[in-house]
Amino acid sequence: MEFFEFLTIFFVAFIMPVAIVKSVLDYKRKQLELERGEGAGLSVGELKRMLGDAVREANEPLAKRVEALEVEAFGEARFSEYEAGFDREELNDQIDDLADELLDDRPASRTLGRRARG
């Protein structure tokens, strides 16, 4: 038997059936995923990103309108001073710190569960 005859027989006898069985199993797995609803939804990260983008897009005209009203009410100089002194990150940090302090100052009697005795 020559080498190419051996390869042809090997391909027909072993490789082709394996490829056909794999294709059938892949098809059945996809059908099962579609029936269960797997693989068709969004991941949590994608959903959060989409919602964040939508909220930013919806709030943009409102923010511009607020800025215009502030300029109209307080004048350009006052608005520039306000804008220059405003640091959103610092404000968010201060809010987080205040929330942590308020949560830490809660009375211990409100806790649920067993208390550790020491």
Image (cartoon, rainbow, N blue to C red):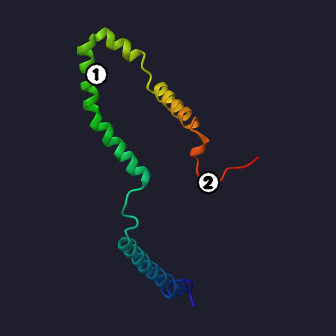
Left or right, 75 with reference to 22? left
* Spot occupied by residue 102 in the image (x, y as percentages of width and height): 53, 33
Left or right, 48 with reference to 105? left
* Spot occupied by residue 81 in the image (x, y as percentages of width and height): 37, 12
Disc assigned to residue 67: 1
In three-dimensional space, the C-alpha distance between marks 1 and 2, rounded to whole angstroms, equals 50 Å
Q: Which of marks 1 and 2 is in front?
A: 2
**The furthest residue to the right:** 118
Decide: marks 1, 2 in contact (CB < 8 A)?
no
Residues packed near mark 1 inside 10 Å, few (<14), some (14 to 19) or many (20 plus): some
Question: What amino acid is at disc 2?
Answer: Gly
Disc assigned to residue 100: none
Question: What amino acid is at disc 1?
Answer: Glu
**The furthest residue to the front:** 109
Left or right, 40 with reference to 108? left
Please determine whether, in this image, residue 40 is positioned above or below residue 11: above
Please determine whether, in this image, residue 117 is positioned above or below residue 28: above
Point 55% across, 86% down: residue: 6
